[in-house]
Image (cartoon, rainbow, N blue to C red):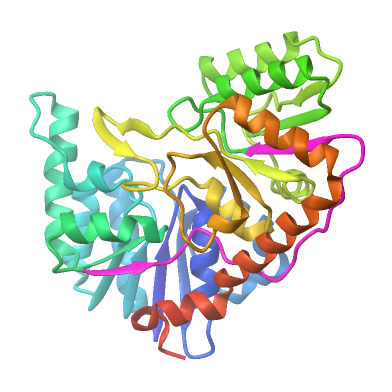
Amino acid sequence: MKTGIFEMEHFEGAYPVIQLFDMPANQLVIFTDADTYGRFADLFKEGVHRFQWEILDPAGGKWRFFRQLYKAAKKHKLDIFYLNTISNNHLFYAWVIGALRIARVVITVHDINCLFRSRWSYQFRQLMHHIGKKALIKRVTEYNVVSDTMIGYLRETTGGQMQIHNVPGAVFESEQHRLTIHEYLHLVVPGSLDKKRRDYREAFELLKMAEARKLRLHITLLGGHTDAYGKAIIQRAAALKTEYATITVYDTRIVHQDEFDRQLNSAHFIYIPSVINTAICYAIPETYGLTKSSGNMFDVIKHARPFIAPQALRISANLESSCFRYTSIEHLVNFLAGIMQNKTAYKAWEEQALLNSGEYTIAKVRERNPTLFAMG
């Protein structure tokens, strides 16, 4: 069996996909670009050489790139072609899939409404996206979603005719860094500084309220920034003058993988101040936990950390018992103050997080997706 995996954006989400398909009876070919290959190399380290790599060059125009992709995939005579992220050029991907005539093509749907609820538009770019999405849908009969909370909505959207897999954006590799609480609580908010995904106003409100309560709290915003909004968050953090509640930010575009992992392993809780209703793809509405999933959930799984999330955010039942649900910032501050007053109570949260992440081992994810991983 030969499986091709395509990814040029969400390397961290394709990492577990590669691990899951990595079986003795399966040959893996990874299609990516040079920059993303470098991030894969950071994750796999010396193990990166176990796989075949097709390094594509996106410079030189779309036609050239997609001819590269077609020729590379055709050469390998793939049995399964697994496209983990398609965020643009849908018409070109539809052409490649149609021309390859591979028996099984699986596409991960990150934003369900973006793919299936696109609308006709008089704006050329948006119209091309719409036509491309319709062409892509016609060529695919298998989809993947990264969260089980999205399965029902996608099944309803597709009329129950398509095969839907649930390969999460992380697997648990049986390692948890055990922590104790001493002088302060450490909360980490992973991900780039993006107002469409996370509400950072909540984090600053939490710091302000913790400072007023003399609660020793440290928040790390673990992500880079690429726009004016991100830069404004950096500046706001730098201007903060506090004694008890402090914050760390990264004035950079990307946080290196080793630093990212180090901070998550030192987090008492992963803090997810998630936006619930958003619109990342043009003006098409999406709902976190229903039509798309927060990547922070996979940081929770991978690092086996207890976490904090808004009451309104849908999360997997497998993770519910290691999550503190807050209804307001005051509610959250009271919870954190209670943990600081009874520090030994934290151990139960950590143990439950370990148990919950245990539901996402490679063996258990394969078992829940037998039609994808029954080849070896």
Q: Is residue 329 one of those drawn in magenta?
A: no
In this view of the protein, can residue 75 be seen by the observer? yes
Residue appearing at x 83%, y 20% in the figure = 214
Q: Is residue 181 one of those drawn in magenta?
A: yes
65 in relation to 82, above or below:
above
In this view of the protein, can residue 108 be seen by the observer? no
Residue 114 position within the rendered picture, expressed as x and y whole percent measured from the top left: 25, 41
Q: Quadrant of the N terminus?
A: bottom left
144 in relation to 75, above or below:
above
227 in relation to 84, above or below:
above
Residue appearing at x 63%, y 32% in the figure = 332
Q: Which residues fall within the magenta stretch?
A: 163-189
Q: Nearer the viewer, residue 131 or 31?
A: 131
Q: Nearer the viewer, residue 305 or 109?
A: 305
Q: What secondary structure predominates along the stretch shown in magenta?
A: loop
Residue 136 position within the rendered picture, expressed as x and y whole percent measured from the top left: 18, 55
Dividing the picture into quadrants, the one containing residue 123 is: top left
